[in-house]
Every structure is written in structure tokens, then in C-alpha cells.
Image (cartoon, helix red, strand yellow):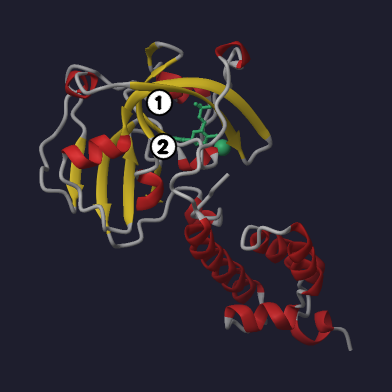
Amino acid sequence: MTEKRRLLPGLDAPAILREAGKLLDKRVEQPSRRAFLRRGLTLGGLAMLSGCSLSDDESVEHALSAVSRFNDRVQGWIFDPAKLAPTYPESMITRPFPFNAFYGIDDVPQVDEASFRLEVTGMVADKRRWRLDELRAMAQVDQVTRHICVEGWSAIGKWGGVPFSAFLNRVGADLSAKYVGFKCADDYYTSIDMPTALHPQTILALTYDGRTLPPEYGFPMKLRMPTKLGYKNPKHIQAIFVTNTYPGGYWEDQGYNWFGGS
Ligand SMILES: Nc1nc2c(c(=O)[nH]1)N[C@H]1C(S)=C(S)[C@@H](COP(=O)(O)O)O[C@H]1N2
Ligand SMILES: [Mo]
């Protein structure tokens, strides 16, 4: 009897194993070990690895998300806080830079600068709200880096703003906390691990290509992280919070890998 019939009447075993294999890819850096793991993975092995019985669609979902959470931990362990993502000359900037959101460009939120205040809450000493010009008054940096979207495109862009580690230090964030979460003006939300928040290339971006961040790219601010995939980079940030409680994210809660390193 094949494993498919024994474990999963009506479920697509090859597709499940392909999905689990993709999730496992990031846990091992050596391609040969990766291929070996993927080839060697069986439904029984997946059940054991995740501690889930694979009896229906729902338990398969559970098993795959357990593998994904395991993958988060491994990506966290192998993340090197000193390793920099590639940077590019300005001549390589992609023009026009693509727009992407979970809605069309006509529905981009229009945030009013005069009344805007950035909320900062959770494990921080200073919960004061921030006006945009206060952020502009801090030391600024810029970077030309590649944005990679899981939908199958990538583009090089130039973002400028406040190094996020400087911001976190300024508000007296507890840097031993596990997560930094973001709430956006368009109901998007996401969260990141503290080591990535403190990475030297993680910036609270206020500009795109030398000008105020335009609405479509995330006015009034976005978090720009060249070490993470596109969906981890929140646009239109309204609130930032530091927490030890897993905050999830818009796409992450629908099955995208949470760590989302690139
Ligand atoms: N607030 C908000 N941030 C978001 C999204 C979104 O829909 N809303 N989409 C994410 C995804 S999937 C991508 S690829 C990038 C796109 O950013 P861009 O429009 O600057 O290319 O934004 C990310 N951040
Ligand atoms: Mo994306």
C-alpha cells in the first residue's frame, strides 16, 4: 500500500511533500544536504517531524505550519547580524519601480502629514508619539538595494531614512525582546525578529529615490530591510510595538513563512 493511500485518502501526497521540501530548504545551507533531505522526506517523516497526524487537509496544514515555524527558528539561528545584503550603483535602480500591495494602486491610503503621529508602544521606555519632522531631524542614511517579492519579481530601489536600531535605542526599546510589530494605515500588519530590527541595513525609510516617500511606496514611512522578502517590509506604518508575544502578519497568518529571509 502506498503511503498516500494509507495516510491521506484524497490528499495530494506529492504536492504536500513538495511544499514541505520548500519549507525545509532554508534550514540547511549546503545544497547537497538540502537535496538529500528533500528526497528523503516521506509523509511519515513529515508527520514525525511535526508531531501531527496527516489525516485530512487541516492536519496537513498544521504539519506544514509546524515545519514553517521550525524553519523560522533555524533561520533565526543562522541569521548573521553582521552580514550585509548586496548594494548597487544608482545607475541600476529599476525605473519605474513596481508598486505592489494586497489591493490596486487606486486604493493606496492617503495619510495626512499634519495630523500624522507615529505610535510607539509595548516594551519601550518612551511611548511618546512622533511627528514626521521629528524623524527627519534624526541622522539619515540611504541605501540602494534589491527588493524581492515572492510573487516572482525583484527590483532595485533607493530608500533613505533613520537606521531602525538608532530609533529603537532612542525610544528605549527593550532590545532583548523577541519581536517588533508594525500596524499600517491600510490594515496591513507584520512583525520581525529583534536581530533583524537591529541589522545595520534595516531603516525606517522616509524617502524613495531622494524624495519624500510617495503614497504608493508607503508614505509616511516604511520599514526597509534588504535581508527580508518584500512582504516583511511594511509600508504606511502607523504604529510600532515591541513585544514578546508573537504578532504574526497579514500574509504570514495565511501561510507565508514568518522569518521571510531573503
Ligand atoms: N502596508 C502595506 N505594506 C506592504 C504591502 C501591503 O499590501 N500593505 N505589501 C507588501 C508586499 S507583498 C510587497 S512586494 C511590498 C511592495 O512594495 P512597493 O510597492 O514599494 O514595491 O510591500 C509590502 N508591504
Ligand atoms: Mo510581495
* Quadrant where the image shows the C terminus: top right
As displayed, is residue 224 above or below residue 122? Answer: above
- Decide: few, some or many residues near mark 2? Use Cα within 10 Å; few <14, some 14-19, many ≥20: many
Question: Which residue is located at x 46 percent, y 23 percent?
Answer: 143
Cβ of disc 2 within 8 Å of ligand 1?
yes
The image shows residue 159 at horizontal and vertical percentages of 43, 22
* Quadrant where the image shows the N terminus: bottom right
Considering the numbered disc 1 on the image, is that residue within a helix, a strand or a loop? Answer: loop
The image shows residue 261 at horizontal and vertical percentages of 54, 48
As displayed, is residue 13 above or below residue 44? Answer: above
* Ligand 2 visible in quadrant: top right
Q: Is residue 5 left or right of residue 114?
A: right
**Circle 1/circle 2 CB separation < 8 Å:** yes
Report the front residue among 185 and 91.
91
Q: Is residue 77 left or right of residue 220?
A: right
Kind of residue at badge 2: Pro
Residue picked out by circle 1: 218
Asked if one can make out residue 91 in the rendered structure from this viewpoint, the answer is yes
Kind of residue at badge 1: Gly
Considering the numbered disc 2 on the image, is that residue within a helix, a strand or a loop? Answer: loop
As displayed, is residue 21 above or below residue 214? Answer: below
Question: Which residue is located at x 56 percent, y 63 percent?
Answer: 71
Residue picked out by circle 2: 234
Question: Which residue is located at x 75 percent, y 84 percent?
Answer: 7
Q: Is residue 119 left or right of residue 227?
A: left
Going from N to C along the chain, the mark reached first, 1 or 2, is 1
Question: Which residue is located at x 25 percent, y 35 percent?
Answer: 166
Cβ of disc 1 within 8 Å of ligand 1?
yes
